Amino acid sequence: FGATKVWRQATVLVCLFAATVAEGFGMASVLPMFSIVLGKEGGGVSALDRLFIDIMAFFGLPMRLDVVACLLVGGFALKGVLFLVAMNHVGVTVAKVTTSLRLKLIGRLLEAKWGYFARQPVGRFGNAISGEATRAGEAYLGVAVLIALQLQTVMYLVLAYLISWRLALAAILLGVLITIALNWLVRRTKRAGRIQTARTRSLTAGLTDALIGLKPLKAMARHMRFAVLFEHDAKELKSALIRQVFSRNARKVAHECSIVIIIAGGFYGAIEILKYPVEEIIVVSLLLMKLVL
């Protein structure tokens, strides 16, 4: 991400930050909507309610349900447009980064000494130029998405704090517990991905080298012996793919079940024991789901 042009980095970060602010404003309008529907004049008592009312008064907008609903839709629509602009910049940069890596690798290979080629399988170069260069470009996309998620997380935590610092603290603790509980599935997926990368590299490199000399081997009827050489890598690749798919789906299911259990228990505790207003619990639950999903 840091290797790209500064203006492109700044454009992406500014658009992502503006999109986060727009989404935060849209989410902030949810609580006043509940207050209006429940007939609470002037909103509730939370700092988020007061802040939203002050912003509405500054722009001379009435605190009516239709106006607040339009602001909710407008905030998320603006967030979508800004996020699309930022991701478009990212998409163009991914293509440029991938192409630049491929051209740089080809140039370095052409400049390398003969001794280097003698020690390396030819298929390794083909795999690096095609598959691994593509993954390197996708890493840039991953960084941009990570930055966007971090900005959203900060915005959601601020909104939760403005509603109730106790509920915000509880949401943070629950998010940490879910992350720790599901960390073993993430590690399992990571290990499967590394095995998949290694076996794919080995299989591609060996198969490419074998195909280069396949014509004389077929002429001598010795080509079938090469199938045994690739069988082990193919089976290991299959096992890694199965583990990766299982771990990814298991993490998704466990994540969703954890969220449902926490929200159900949190609703009961916050309403029956702590006596928090229902609208605040609903908004904090929405923020919690956005934080941990």
Image (spheres, helix red, strand yellow):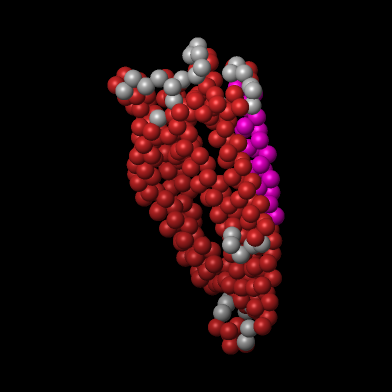
Q: Residue furthest top?
A: 39
Does the magenta-highlighted stretch encompass residue 94?
no
Looking at the picture, how far across and down is residue 276, in whole percent?
37, 22
Asked where in the image residue 61 lies, by quadrant, the reply is top right
For residue 30, side relative to residue 6 (left or right): left
User: Would residue 87 be visible to someone looking at this image?
Assistant: no
Residue appearing at x 68%, y 39% in the figure: 81
Q: Is residue 171 above or below residue 93?
A: above
In front: 163, or 282?
Answer: 163
For residue 174, side relative to residue 136 (left or right): left
In front: 40, or 85?
Answer: 40
Residue appearing at x 62%, y 60% in the figure: 137
Q: Is residue 182 above or below residue 266?
A: below
In front: 255, or 21?
Answer: 21
Does the magenta-highlighted stretch encompass residue 75?
yes
Looking at the picture, how far across and down is residue 182, in whole percent?
38, 45
Q: Residue furthest left?
A: 273
**Quadrant in which the N terminus is drawn:** bottom right
Residue appearing at x 34%, y 24% in the figure: 270
User: Would residue 217 be visible to someone looking at this image?
Assistant: yes
Residue appearing at x 63%, y 56% in the figure: 9
Looking at the picture, how far across and down is residue 121, in whole percent?
57, 77
In front: 250, or 90?
Answer: 90
- Give the residues in magenta: 68-92
